[in-house]
Amino acid sequence: MMAESLIRLRRFDDALVALDRCEEMARETHWWHRQALALEGLNRFDEATAAVDKALSILTEKHFASAFLRVKARLQAAKDSEACIETVKEAITKVDNQKFRKELESDLSAFQKRFQ
């Protein structure tokens, strides 16, 4: 929780330190998700993508997949990769929440315009 608060405060280096202190949680998808968010904040996109991929690989609660895929799409877009479009499309297929679906559809539209 501390790492999540630090990420919201945009204290990404401190968030990574907090995550390192609870390394035993690295078996948990949310640890990897927060790791990815902190790394993204530091513009360490390749490491952040690897962290999201790790979160997705150990994901047991499938309803979180769309959120993790959204982060991955954002990272791909930051690296100017059109793959973000397919990633968001995949996230849309996995989402149940209508409000979040609309956010993903908005992301998709923005990425499609950007990479036209």
Image (cartoon, rainbow, N blue to C red):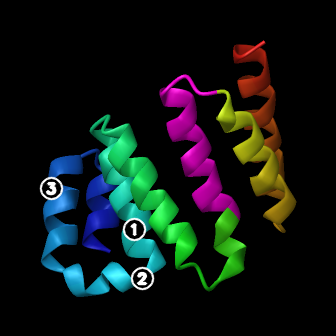
Alpha carbon of mark 3 to alpha carbon of mark 2: how far?
Answer: 20 Å
Left or right: 95 with respect to 22?
right
Which residue type does callout 2 highlight? Glu
Secondary structure beneath disc 1? Answer: helix
Task: Give the mark nearer the N terminus: 3 vs 2.
Answer: 3
Q: Is residue 79 magenta?
A: yes
- What is the span of residues highlighted in magenta in the rendered image? 66-81
Looking at the image, is 99 positioned above or below residue 83? below
Q: Residues within 10 Å of mark 2 (few under 14, many from 20)?
A: some
The residue tagged with tag 3: helix, strand or loop?
helix
Of the numbered discs 1 and 3, the one sitting upstream in the chain is 3
Image location (x, y in percent) of residue 87: 71, 46
Q: Quadrant of the C terminus?
A: top right
Q: Nearer the viewer, residue 6 or 12?
A: 12
| Residue pointed to by mark 2 | 28
Residue to which mark 3 is pinned: 14
Residue contact between numbered discs 2 and 1, judged by CB atoms under 8 Å: yes
| Residue 20 location, quadrant | bottom left
Q: Residue at x 64, y 71 (%)?
A: 64
Please state which amino acid type lies under the numbered disc 1. Trp
Give the labeled residue for mark 1: 32
Q: Nearer the viewer, mark 3 or mark 2?
A: 2
